[in-house]
Image (cartoon, rainbow, N blue to C red):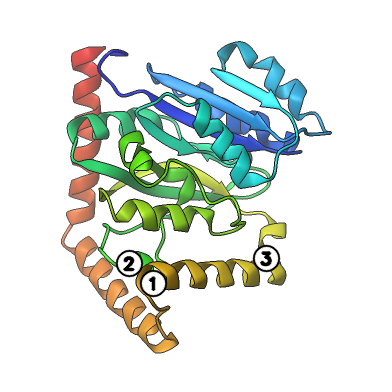
Amino acid sequence: MKETLPKISVITPSYNQGLYLEETMLSVLTQEYPNLEYIVIDGGSTDNSVSIIEKYASRLSHWESERDRGFGHAINKGFAKATGDILCWLNSDDILLPGALLTVGTYFKAHPDVGLIYGDRHIIDDASKLIYRRRYFFYLPGQLRYAKTFPQECTFWRRSAFEKVGGNLHEELKYAIDLELWCRLSQVTAIRHIPVFLGAFRDQPQSKSATLLEVGRKERESIIASYYKSYPSAVRLKVYQVWLGTLRRLYRALGLEAGKRNSVLKLRDEISKQEG
């Protein structure tokens, strides 16, 4: 199976996240995906992060711990080391759900025309307890203009598409660095949503401060204006949200989401049996 499923490179940037880092790393290392490259880039942590990384060093493709220029720089350093066909990054407090990489790898194998996919996510608390499940919708061209972005820890893309748009993240961004990348990738490749839970986002109190939310809002508006010429007005945003909600309810009422989910999982299981 290793020779036929695409190599997936997972990058984890980390700085003083010893409280969650081991859980994050284990969520990747226990995936049982046969063609995995896992890279951890630590920014010179002063807590117990390095000892955690060293504990699993033999199972990592590469790791380092030294000061960097921040979050985006750390991820770019990881991508520079990566050799996989499929790329993603997983923050050091988020996790992948069991079977996520096999679902991703088999989907990309079966859909060579698709360059980016995103799945559904769990929202967890500080103690890793499930708060709620968040299902997303099939991709609609132009949705990024309305800041309808993808769950970062559940998003994967092809190296070939990434290289077409520069092969790096814009390091000057702090809170909307993923949205900017999605906007770039949307211009060069096909995007699909797969209705399968792939990862979990950790909802932490410090991520909700008014200052952070305001900085993130300004970054999103600037990014969207640069790619779509203008940021939609509050009225247009509201109309879009109402329309999208109606479409989502109709889609689910017709059973289309469940049918697509079952077909994705069936494909994964069939390929596993054929190549296992």
User: Which of the marked residues, 2 or 3, is nearer the chain's N terminus?
Assistant: 2
Above or below 106: residue 206: below
Task: Report if residue 139 is visible in the image.
Answer: yes
Q: Residues within 10 Å of mark 1 (few under 14, many from 20)?
A: some
Out of 196 and 107, give the one closest to the viewer: 107
- Disc 3 marks a residue whose amino acid type is Leu
- Disc 1 marks a residue whose amino acid type is Tyr
Element type at mark 2: helix
Residue annotated with mark 2: 143
Identified at 51% across, 30% down, the residue is: 80
- Disc 2 marks a residue whose amino acid type is Gln
Q: Position of residue 269 (x, y in %)?
A: 24, 26
Identified at 44% across, 28% down, the residue is: 9
Cβ atoms under marks 1 and 2 closer than 8 Å: yes
Disc 1 and disc 2: Cα gap in Å? 5 Å
Disc 2 and disc 3: Cα gap in Å? 23 Å
Out of 211 and 62, give the one closest to the viewer: 62
Q: Position of residue 252 (x, y in %)?
A: 23, 61
Q: Position of residue 126 (x, y in %)?
A: 68, 47
Identified at 28% across, 13% down, the residue is: 3
Which quarter of the rendering shows the C terminus? Answer: top left
Which quarter of the rendering shows the N terminus? Answer: top left
138 lies left or right of 72:
left
Element type at mark 3: helix
Q: Quadrant of residue 65?
A: top right
Above or below 229: residue 86: above
Residue annotated with mark 1: 146
Q: Quadrant of residue 159?
A: top left
149 lies left or right of 72:
left
Residue annotated with mark 3: 212
- Give the label on residue 184, or none: none
Q: Residues within 10 Å of mark 3 (few under 14, many from 20)?
A: few
